[in-house]
Image: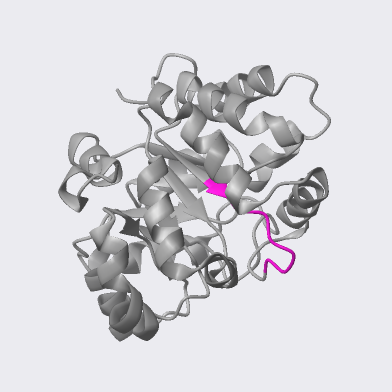
C-alpha cells in the first residue's frame, strides 16, 4: 500500500536528520541476481541513511564505465523490472531506510507509466530519479500521478544549470535535489576541486528550500565529509560498485565499505 507524500520516508528523514546523510547507490542484480536483498539489508545495518537502487539499463547515458558494466552484468544475470519489484517487495518489511529507484524514463515507458508508479508505491519505493525526464513533461504529464503514489521525485542540477532552472527544480523536487558535483559521467573523477567548492558555495547562497545531496566523484570518507559541509549529505555509487565486484560475501563487503566512509558507530536512522 502506498504511503502519502506527507508520510514519505525521505521527507521525514530530512526533517529528522538534516545533515551528514549518506546515500549509497548500487545496481540491482549485481554482482549476482540474488544479491539485491542482501545488499539492501546490509546497507541499512551498516549505516546508510538512504539507498538508491539502480534499474539496469542497456543505454545509461549519465553513467560511467563502472556502473555501465554492472548494469550489463545484471541484465546478463537476468534482472528485469518485474523481478526487481519482487525482490524489493520481499524485503521491504525488514527495512526502515528510504528506497529510491534510479534509472531512465524509457524503462518506465516500456513498463507503462501509470503501472510503474503504482507498483513503486505498492512495494514501498519512496523516491525516483529519472535524469532524462524533462521538467516540462514531469510537471504537465506525470507529477500528479507520481505524487499520488507518495513518491518523492528528485531532479539533477549541475555546475552549468542556470539560476532560473535551479529555482524551477527547487520548486518541483520533493525529498531532495541531486546536486551533480561536476559535468562528467559517474565515477570519472575523484576528489573535490576548488572550482567545485565555488559551485557548492554559489548554490548555498541561493538558499533553496529543498535539501541537496551531492553526487558524482564522492568516493571516500574525505570527499563525503567535504560534500557534507556544503549540502545535507552525499551520494556514493561507483566506489561501492567497485567494492562489490568479485566479492564472495556482499554483506561483509557492504559493511566494510560503509565503515570506511563513516565509521561503525553511526546507524542508519540515528
Instruction: Judge from the rendering whether residue 218 lies leftward or rightward of residue 94; answer left or right.
Output: right
Query: Residue 90's x, y, as percent?
Result: 50, 29
Q: Is residue 191 above or below residue 30?
A: below
Residue 128 is inside the magenta segment: no
Nearest the eye: 4 or 127:
4
- Please say which color scheme the image uses: one colour
**Is residue 29 at all visible to an observer of this figure?**
yes
| Image spot of residue 175 (x, y percent) | 29, 53
Q: Does the magenta portion include 54?
A: yes
Using the image as rendered, state which of residue 198 and residue 254 is in the foreground. Answer: 254
Q: Quick one: quadrant of the C terminus?
A: top left
Q: Is residue 48 left or right of residue 69?
A: left
Vertical placement of residue 193 versus 255, above or below:
below
Image coordinates of residue 188 in percent, x first then y, are 70, 59
Q: Main secondary structure of the magenta part?
A: loop
Which contiguous range is marked in magenta? Answer: 53-60
**Residue, x 47% and y 80% (percent of image)?**
160
Amino acid at each position: 500500500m502506498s504511503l502519502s507524500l506527507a508520510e514519505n520516508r525521505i521527507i521525514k528523514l530530512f526533517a529528522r536528520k538534516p545533515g551528514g546523510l549518506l546515500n549509497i547507490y548500487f545496481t540491482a542484480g549485481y554482482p549476482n541476481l540474488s544479491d539485491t536483498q542482501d545488499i539492501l539489508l546490509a546497507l541499512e545495518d551498516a549505516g546508510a541513511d538512504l539507498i538508491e537502487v539502480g534499474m539496469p539499463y542497456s543505454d545509461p547515458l549519465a553513467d560511467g564505465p563502472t556502473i555501465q558494466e554492472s548494469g550489463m552484468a545484471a541484465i546478463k544475470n537476468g534482472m528485469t523490472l518485474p523481478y526487481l519489484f519482487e525482490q524489493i517487495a520481499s524485503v521491504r518489511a525488514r527495512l526502515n531506510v528510504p528506497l529510491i529507484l534510479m534509472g531512465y524514463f524509457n524503462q518506465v515507458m516500456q513498463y507503462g507509466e501509470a503501472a510503474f508508479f503504482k507498483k513503486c508505491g505498492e512495494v514501498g519505493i519512496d523516491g525516483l530519479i529519472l535524469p532524462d525526464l524533462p521538467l516540462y513533461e514531469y510537471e504537465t504529464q506525470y507529477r500528479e500521478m507520481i505524487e499520488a503514489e507518495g513518491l518523492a521525485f528528485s531532479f539533477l542540477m549541475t555546475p552549468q544549470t542556470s539560476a532560473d532552472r535551479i529555482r524551477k527544480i527547487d520548486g518541483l523536487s520533493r525529498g531532495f535535489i541531486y546536486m551533480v558535483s561536476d559535468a562528467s559521467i559517474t565515477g570519472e573523477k575523484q576528489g573535490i576541486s576548488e572550482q567545485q567548492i565555488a559551485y557548492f558555495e554559489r548554490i548555498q547562497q541561493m538558499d533553496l528550500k529543498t535539501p541537496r545531496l551531492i553526487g558524482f566523484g564522492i568516493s571516500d570518507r574525505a570527499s563525503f565529509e567535504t560534500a557534507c559541509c556544503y549540502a545535507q549529505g552525499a551520494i556514493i555509487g561507483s566506489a561501492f560498485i567497485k567494492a562489490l565486484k568479485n566479492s564472495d560475501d556482499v554483506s561483509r563487503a557492504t559493511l566494510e565499505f560503509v565503515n570506511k566512509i563513516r565509521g561503525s558507530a553511526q546507524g542508519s536512522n540515528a
